[in-house]
Amino acid sequence: MQIDGAGRQQRGHVLLIAGDAAVRRRTVQLAPSANLAALGVLPVPVLLGSEVPSDTTYLDGARDPNTVLMRLRTAAATPGPLLVYLSGRLTLDRRGNRLHLALAGTTSSSVRYTALPWDWLGTELGARPSGPTTVVLDLVADKSAWPLLQEYGSLPAPPSAEVYGVVVPPAFAGGEDRVSSYTRHWIDQLRRSPTRPTHLQLHAFAVGAAALPPGTLVLPATHEIGAPAPQAHREQTPDPRPHIHALAAGGQHQEASALAQAWQQHVVQTHGNASPEATHWAEIRADLARMAGNYRSATQLWIDAGRTRLEHQHPDAPEVLAAAAGALYCWTQLKDRAAARDTGPELVHLLRALPSIEPRLLRLTQQRLEVLEGTAAPAVSAHAGPHPQAGLDYADTR
């Protein structure tokens, strides 16, 4: 039996909340119920990342925000680890200019009465008695909420919690009524990993592997990969990553890149070029390049990081797989034929070194490279479409 600092038995809680589905032109963009059903198959200790006795609460189809509030309050009172997962549509109460999670039946005119105010989440989780708190988000912002999120540059989140997730913009095409790409890759990694990855590692892999629409808000961005410095070091040296991310999120990409490169040079001089610290900063620069739309540089940086990690880590290590996923995603976004052709062989070489990589993913990458090099007929991949696992689009080989 595990006891917390107040003498209470430690007990965990998993709270899974499905809000209203996001629909565009009669096509489901996000199906929260499908996400909850998929998560519900996983054992609770795997979801929570803890072996303490735990409770699980599913809220699917709730129409009353006060019902959700009471469940949230009960979960927050748990004297142990807590995982809160929310999926659905973010909307805005135009009168109060407040973000809400739309619940079943929420309309633009009934937001104030039928949706969950987003700040309630921070209020309840901010009063947690003890235990680590993790919030995982898989959301779509509607047309009313998206401008406010762009103004914020982020999504307000409980300061006492670790928050991971994505908020997709309102204009993406959507798909079938199924598990969303981000949540699916989160689940796949939990199933495939021999040891349970951290929430941060799961987030990094899911972001790298999912086919996220352009402009997607990522919380936190994948440049946050890596272990924090020891407490004593953090007290002596300012942790620059939030500042760098704020610069990039505000469109100051050159400033963010220059600052990250300066820190990388400092780390290289201190710890060595192949050190984990230097590799971490290479990954930060890779994600900054992605945010700036410089996919060629991002692809090369992710490839370099993946190769460096392979020299010191197992091919199935989450950090290695995350680097490969980042490289592959950025490579598929390259519109310049020459740039894709130049970086393609190194990417294929990296993917071949990963025994757990999905075989079809490697095959499609090789096929696209053959088309780019002119050694295969364009028809080979012109109709390949998005990959069912990673959701990456191989159709554009021009």
Image (tube, grey):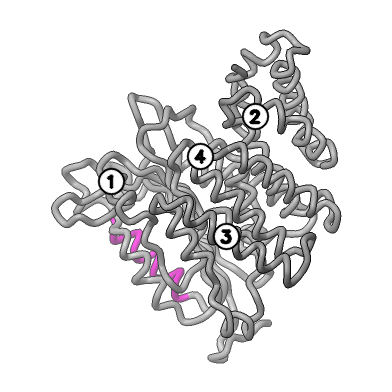
Identify which residue is drawn at 30% across, 52% down. Answer: 151
Q: In front: 282, or 354? A: 282
Residue 314 vs residue 17, the one in the foreground? 314
Q: State the residue in front, 195 or 114.
A: 195
- Mark 2 or mark 4, which has the lower sequence index? 4
Q: CA distance from mark 2 to mark 4?
A: 14 Å
Q: Main secondary structure of the magenta part?
A: helix
Q: Is residue 75 visible?
A: yes
Residue 322 to residue 382: above or below: below
Q: How many marks?
A: 4
Q: Position of residue 121 (x, y in %)?
A: 37, 64
Which three-letter amino acid code belongs to the residue tagged 1?
Pro
Q: Do labels 1 and 2 touch, CB within 8 Å?
A: no
Q: Is residue 122 magenta?
A: no
The residue that mark 3 highlights is: 260
Question: Mark 1 to mark 4: distance in Å?
Answer: 21 Å
Badge 3 crowding class, 10 Å Cα cut-off, few under 14, some 14 to 19, many 20 or more, is many
The mark that comes first in sequence, 4 or 3, is 3
> Which residue does the numbered mark 2 point to in the structure image?
339
Neighbor class of circle 1 (other Cα within 10 Å; few <14, some 14-19, many 20+) is some
What amino acid type should be assigned to the residue bearing mark 4?
A: Gly
- In the displayed structure image, the side of residue 391 where residue 141 appears, left or right: left
Which of marks 4 and 1 precedes in the sequence?
Answer: 1
Q: Name the quadrant of the C terminus.
A: top right
